[in-house]
Image (spheres, rainbow, N blue to C red):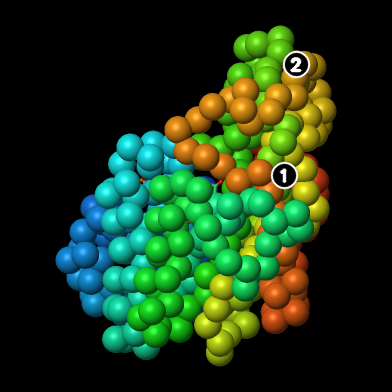
Amino acid sequence: MDFSPITTNTLLITGTTGQVGSALLSLFPGALAPTRADLDLTDPFSIRACIRLHRPRWIINPAAYTAVDKAESEPALAHAINADAPGILGEEAREIGASVLHFSTDYVFDGTKPTPDLESDPTHPLSVYGASKLGGEQALAATGAAHIILRTSWVYGATGKNFLLTILKLAAARPELRIVADQTGAPTSAADLANLAAQIIAANPTESGIFHATSQGETTWHGFATEFLRLANITTTLIPIPTSAYPTPARRPANNRLNCDKLRDTFNLQLPPWQTSLAKVLNALSTSS
Ligand SMILES: NC(=O)c1ccc[n+]([C@@H]2O[C@H](COP(=O)([O-])OP(=O)(O)OC[C@H]3O[C@@H](n4cnc5c(N)ncnc54)[C@H](OP(=O)(O)O)[C@@H]3O)[C@@H](O)[C@H]2O)c1
C-alpha cells in the first residue's frame, strides 16, 4: 500500500519492540521511534521531554503493559503505563496541536452481552489490565487532544509474545494440548492493525473517537488453534476445555466480539476475515524460518 502522502518523520511511534509497534515501524521506517530509555511511559517527565523535543504531528501509542495476568499483582505499574501515560501523551499533544492514535482492548467490557459490543455500550472491565486500559481511554479523551482510539482483540503476528507462537511451540513438543473453547473473539493481526492505523492517519480525521477494530468473523481460542495447526500441518490433538478448567489470575470476558461497523461507516475501512490474515502470518513465519 502507498502511504507516501504521510510525512513519516512527523510520526512518533511508541513501543516499537512490540507486536503492533514493530509492524508500524516496518510501514514507516522513517518515523521517530523512541526506545524505552528515551520515552519511559512510567515517567511523566520522560514522556513530556520526548514529545517537546520532537514535536510530532501524530503520536501513535501501541506501547502498553500487556501482561494481563501479571497486572493483577502489579496494578500500580499497569495503571501508570496504561492509564496515566495516555493522559500525559494527550496533554502534550494538545499543547503542540498533535493528534494521538491510541490502542485499547475488548477487555474494557465484561463479555456478558450476547451480541458484539458497540463503542457506545457500557464498559465494565473484569481485570486490572482491562480497568487500566479503560482508564487510558478516559484520560486521553479528557485532555481534549485530537485522538483516535482503536479497541482491538487477540493480537498476534509472526514475532512477539502471542497465543499463535506459544501454541506452535507447545504443539511441536506435545501430542495433545487443552485449549479454552468458551471464549469467543476475533484474532487480529498486528500487521493489519498497523495498516489500518496508517490508513486512518492518511485520511486525516477531523473527529476524535473510539473505534472497534478487529478482524472480521469470530472463533474461539480452540477454533483459532485448530485452524493454524491445520494450516501448518501439525497433528497435535487439541482438547476443548472450558475457561473454568484453566484458571488464571485475571478474569477474561466470555464474549470478546466487537462490532466494527462504526469504523466501516466512518472511514470505509474493514480488516480482513481472520482466516485470511492468519494464512498471511503463517506464510511470513514459514518464509522467515
Ligand atoms: N496483545 C493483545 O492480545 C492485545 C489485545 C487487545 C488490545 N491490545 C492492545 O494493543 C496494543 C498493542 O499491543 P501489542 O500486543 O503490540 O503489545 P506488546 O507486543 O506487548 O508490546 C508492548 C510494547 O510496549 C512497550 N512498553 C511497555 N512498557 C513500557 C514503558 N514503561 N515505556 C515504554 N514502552 C513500554 C514494550 O517495550 P519493551 O519491549 O521494552 O517491554 C513493547 O514495545 C496495546 O495497547 C494493547 O493493550 C493488545
Q: Inspect the image, locate mark 2, and give the three-letter code of the amino acid beneath it.
A: Thr
Q: Residue at x 24, y 77 (%)?
A: 52
Q: Residue at x 34, y 50 (%)?
A: 78
Query: What residue did someone put label 1 on?
Result: 184
Q: CA distance from mark 1 to mark 2?
A: 22 Å
Q: Earlier in the sequence, mark 1 or mark 2?
A: 1
Is residue 198 or residue 40 the one in the foreground? 40
Categorize mark 1 by other alpha carbons within 10 Å: few (<14), some (14-19), many (20+). Answer: many
Q: Residue 264 in the image: x percent, y percent?
A: 74, 74
Question: 222 above or below 84?
Answer: above
**Which quadrant of the structure image shows residue 34?**
bottom left
Q: Residue 155 in the image: x percent, y percent?
A: 60, 48
Q: Residue 268 in the image: x percent, y percent?
A: 75, 77
Q: Quadrant of the C terminus?
A: top right
Q: In the structure shown, which secondary structural element does the residue marked by tag 1 occupy? A: strand
Question: 6 above or below 246?
Answer: below
Query: What residue did someone put label 2 on?
Result: 236
Q: Residue at x 78, y 49 (%)?
A: 218
Say whether residue 286 is visible: no
Q: Residue 176 in the image: x percent, y percent?
A: 71, 13
